[in-house]
Amino acid sequence: MFELAPWKPISELSNLRREMDKLWADFFGEGELATRTETWVPAVDVSETKDAIFVKAEVPGMDPKDIDVSLSGDMLVIKGEKKEEKEEQDENFHRIEMRRGSFSRAIRIPVPVDKDKIEAKYESGILKIKLPKTEETKPKQIEIKVS
């Protein structure tokens, strides 16, 4: 048999609102579900000197062997995968916020660079890439002659 209960519209609206907020948060990557399944991209800094372009990417906790750096035309591509740690059988998680999974980040390099002299180093969770400019793109000081 079913039991009749009084309808409480305010309570129903609150529950509906809470469920809709959770749905939107998960959809846009802010909820608990999103932290397990969404892809991620490392934060990068790109700077330039007269001799080179420098790219720093934040990839903490990664093994450098799991990161691939390539240059195709004027696009620098950083790809990799932050692997899932093995979970203990008796371990119940209360919160999972650490990003895991594959990522790919493409950065347009604004000037021609010497592909044979590109260097990439990994230290303390930061990938540092130096892309030396070609001689043609380096600024050249022109002397003004007085006649």
Image (cartoon, rainbow, N blue to C red):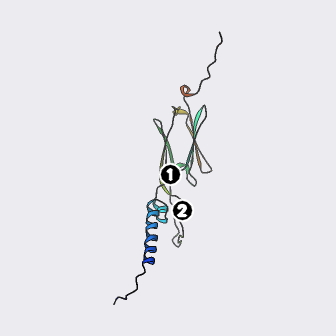
Which three-letter amino acid code belongs to the residue tagged 2? Glu
Observer-nearest of 54 and 143: 143
Circle 2 sits on which residue? 97
Give the vertical position of 4 relative to 95 (above or below): below
Identify the mark nearer the N-term, 2 or 1: 1
Element assignment for label 1: loop
Q: Which residue is most to the left?
A: 1
Which class describes the residues within 10 Å of circle 2: few (<14), some (14-19), or many (20+)? few
Residue 104 x, y percent position in the rendering: 47, 48
Mark 1, other Cα within 10 Å: few <14 / some 14–19 / many ≥20: some
Element carrying mark 2: loop
Residue 24 percent coordinates (x, y): 44, 63
In the rendered image, the vertical position of residue 75 relative to residue 104, given as above or below: above
Q: Nearer the viewer, residue 118 or 95?
A: 95
Q: Residue most toward the bottom?
A: 1
Residue lying at 49% horizontally and 61% vertically, measured from the top left? 30
In the image, 82 versus 42, the foreground residue is 42
